[in-house]
Amino acid sequence: MKIKDRFVLGLISGMAGNAVKMLIDEISLRKKISKRSFRSTAAGIMVGKKKHADSATGQVLGGIFDFGFAALGGVATVYFLSKTGRDHLIFKGVASGLFIGSFITSILSGFPGSKVAPKDASSNLSYMLSHIAYGLTTASVASALGHPSLFDTPPLNDYLTPTEKTTEIAGQQEKQQQAQPVGYH
């Protein structure tokens, strides 16, 4: 069963994308590529001190904040795909992941009270690679779970006929064929 609600699809897709992003973040932390987790960085906005952000409650707070941003990004990605279609999905996934990741990272590091955000290149590069994986996963899950009608883009005006058959047009043609009496053509 495909999901027809853009908001619900966005939440589910964003959460799936964030799970992949967090997995990459954990690997990056354990291999010492990154100095700070997404959870610590997100928690640092609200608590402002590294020791509070790295505490158990700070990690939970940061995780909730991080998943909230991911869900919001998932909704934005679904609306983006609804307007532009599912073609070139890899490119659109990478682009949306980079855009959302850059936007969120700049917001998180731009708060005056945030002293937790890492300033080194390797951590931030790891963040961007994680966001690419987030975007790819989010777009792929949205495409796989979303109902095809969500991704049909209407024609730009009423004067041009579509060059490809949309599911709406196919459905209308099927109804017309079913309405014709048998034996009359």
Image (cartoon, rainbow, N blue to C red):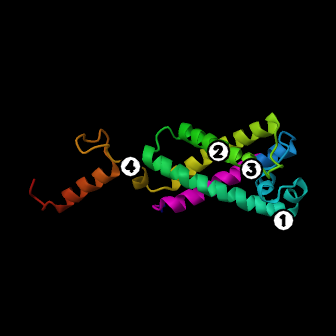
Badge 3 amino acid: Phe
Please name the residue shown 65% across and 55% down the image: 69
Tell me how far mark 1 sits from mark 3, CA to CA: 21 Å
Is-magenta flag for residue 11?
A: yes
Instruction: In the displayed orientation, state which residue is furthest to the right.
Output: 51
Judged by its main secondary structure, the magenta piece is helix
Per the rendering, the mark at residue 111 is: 3
Q: Name the residue type under label 2.
A: Phe
Q: Nearer the viewer, mark 4 or mark 3?
A: 3
**Residue under numbered circle 4:** 152
In 3D space, how far apart are the residues under numbered discs 2 and 3 (Cα atoms)?
13 Å
- Label 4 vs 3, first from the N-terminus: 3
Where does the magenta region start and end? 4-24
**What is the secondary structure assignment of the residue under circle 2?**
helix
Label 2, label 1: how many angstroms apart (C-alpha)?
A: 26 Å
Along the line of sight, the residue nearer the viewer: 59 or 94: 59
Image coordinates of residue 96 in percent, x first then y, are 58, 43
- Foreground tag (1 vs 4): 1
Q: Is residue 2 visible?
A: no
**Kind of residue at badge 4:** Asp
Marks 4 and 2, how far apart at CA: 28 Å
Q: Which of the marked residues, 1 or 4, is nearer the chain's N terminus?
A: 1
